Amino acid sequence: MTSEKRVLLDFIGIAALCGAAIALVAYFTGDPLELPSYIGGVLNRSLMSPFQAALLAGVIAVPLHSLWVFTRYRVQVAPAYESFASWAQTLFTSFGFMGTIVGVSLAVGGLQTAMEDGEPGALIGGLSTAFDTTFLGLTGAVALMMLRRLIRLKGPQHS
């Protein structure tokens, strides 16, 4: 039987690889990428912010991790994955909310400068952080919720 600890270590490894890939993209591109749409904007801004990049790495790691775990361990991993995904889902939501608080705080901190100088950059940057981290946190949580449901549907049926 595969343990929750093994599933967690696998996730940390895959998330670290995703984080390294994001860091390399951010390093080699330097300038913001020209990606259209809201998702493109979130990805672009996430490359420039360590907290958002870490959340993005986690979000990207979720489907890769589940594919890895179920390919490697097969059905026997379902209880351990369910336990891992339960608290990881809560962590994604919590980190997204934490980023919301930080972003709103940054926006409020930049409000006076925006009003005095007529330059809304700090205000907009803070709001961007708030919305982007909320989006990333909820995306990770929803992905895990869907995977947990899929596991329950494919698992042994109890009468």
Image (spheres, grey):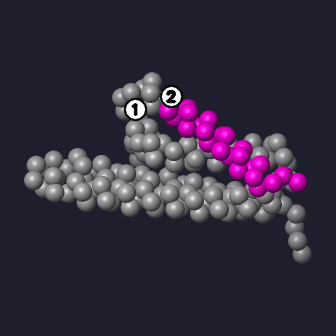
Mark 2 sits on what residue?
24
Residue at mark 2 to residue at mark 1: CA–CA distance: 13 Å
Q: Quadrant of the N terminus?
A: bottom right
> Disc 2 or 1, which lies upstream in sequence?
2
Quarter of the image where one finds residue 91 = bottom right
* Residue at 50% over, 52% down: 136
Observer-nearest of 119 and 40: 119
Quarter of the image where one finds residue 45 = top left
* Residue at 24% over, 49% down: 122
Question: What element does badge 1 sit on?
Answer: loop
Q: Quadrant of the C terminus?
A: bottom right
Residue 157: x and y, percent? 87, 67
Q: Main secondary structure of the magenta part?
A: helix
Type of amino acid at the residue the image marks with label 1: Leu
Give the side of residue 90 with respect to residue 44, left or right: right
Tell me, yes or no, whether the highlighted magenta stretch contains residue 8.
yes
* Residue at 44% over, 53% down: 133
Residue 152: x and y, percent? 78, 63
Mark 1 sits on what residue?
33
Return the mark for residue 45: none
Residue 92: x and y, percent? 55, 57
Type of amino acid at the residue the image marks with label 2: Leu
Question: What element does badge 2 sit on?
Answer: helix
**Magenta residues?**
1-23
Estimate how packed mark 2 is, as few (under 14), some (14 to 19) or many (20 or more) residues with alpha carbons within 10 Å. few
Give the side of residue 38 with respect to residue 55, left or right: left
Observer-nearest of 128 and 112: 112
Estimate how packed mark 1 is, as few (under 14), some (14 to 19) or many (20 or more) residues with alpha carbons within 10 Å. some
Tell me, yes or no, whether the highlighted magenta stretch contains residue 33.
no
